[in-house]
Amino acid sequence: MLELELDHVGIAVEDLERGRAAFARLGFRLTARSLHAGSPAPAAPVIPWGSGNHCAMLESGYLEVIGLTDRSLYSSVKDMVARYQGLHIVALGCGDADAAYQALAGAGLPVDAPRALERDAAFGPSEDGLRRARFRNIYLDRERYPEARFLYIEHLTREVLWQPHLLRHPNGAIGLEATYFCAAQAQAAGDKIAQAMRVRPEAAGAGHVRMQLARGSLHVFEPSVWTALSGQGPLPPLPAPVGVCVRVASLQAVRTLLAQGGVQTVERDGIWVGPAEACGASVRFIE
């Protein structure tokens, strides 16, 4: 049985430095810039890509701010930001990529064989070292699954990403709890996504479908339900991922930090930061 975890989400931006600064302002400790290299197709050689990232590593999961660094090189980020800047990537931890591919393809899902992805990452508390982070990714066909850039990820070098000093954030962030999607018909979109997650969708109220993973959860809302819950807008072209939920040690500490930084928030069963402050995504902090 294939069990998937909510591994990370990716916010795609045109200006990577601006994206880094925005999430630092929200109290996240971001990793140093890291440039991608990978296989543009299954079995293709690893080549430099024209994208890079800064990540907020959490005890469970992480947030990735991903952006263009060289438009002359291959990068899937080009298509993302051409559609909209904001939340695009939803990555599911799958353990063994080969076994996951067999299970997913065997279930009739439109997935490619695993591809290599690599990037150099600063290493050590002083960030004066350099290690190669390596992954194997399986991509779900986005034409058939336009709800997100879904991928299944096998981490080959977890020690390079989850370094102890990177897990301490000014906002007290602990874990990535959930990803939120918006679609015109929540039930239909939830049923479809649940099939790709190998889980059973659950009705969680009018216009709201929930999917529980082995760690973390996915939620699909209809637009009016999402707006009533979050108080946030505007929305990107739908269907799309629109927000994330991050668990923190203290909501009061988050409230104080954001107020001191002049960040506008909404308080509705947690503290919400809207798309204008978070590069097109909504971020919900819960305790």
Image (cartoon, grey):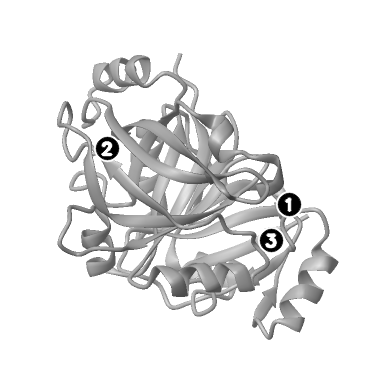
Say if 133 sits above or below 156 in the image. Answer: below
Determine the CA span between mark 1 and mark 2: 33 Å
Disc 1 target residue: 168
* Residue 242 image position (x, y, % from top left): 45, 62
* View extreme (front): residue: 128
Residues packed near mark 1 inside 10 Å, few (<14), some (14 to 19) or many (20 plus): some
- Of pointers 1 and 3, the one earlier in the residue sequence: 1
Quarter that holds the N terminus: top left
Residues packed near mark 2 inside 10 Å, few (<14), some (14 to 19) or many (20 plus): many
Quarter that holds the C terminus: bottom right
* Residue 249 image position (x, y, % from top left): 81, 53
Between label 1 and label 3, give the one nearer the viewer: 1
Tell me whether the residue at label 2 lies in contact with that at label 3, contact meaning CB atoms closer than 8 angstroms: no
Q: Amino acid at mark 1?
A: Arg
- The secondary element bearing badge 2 is classed as loop
Say if 233 sits above or below 150 in the image. Answer: below
Disc 3 target residue: 285
- Of pointers 2 and 3, the one earlier in the residue sequence: 2
- Of pointers 1 and 2, the one earlier in the residue sequence: 2
Say if 161 sits above or below 206 in the image. Answer: above
- The secondary element bearing badge 1 is classed as loop
**Residue, x 64% and y 61% (percent of image)?**
28
Disc 2 target residue: 140
Residues packed near mark 3 inside 10 Å, few (<14), some (14 to 19) or many (20 plus): many
**Residue, x 58% and y 64% (percent of image)?**
283
Determine the CA span between mark 1 and mark 3: 16 Å
Determine the CA span between mark 2 and mark 3: 29 Å
User: Quick check: can you spot residue 171?
Assistant: yes
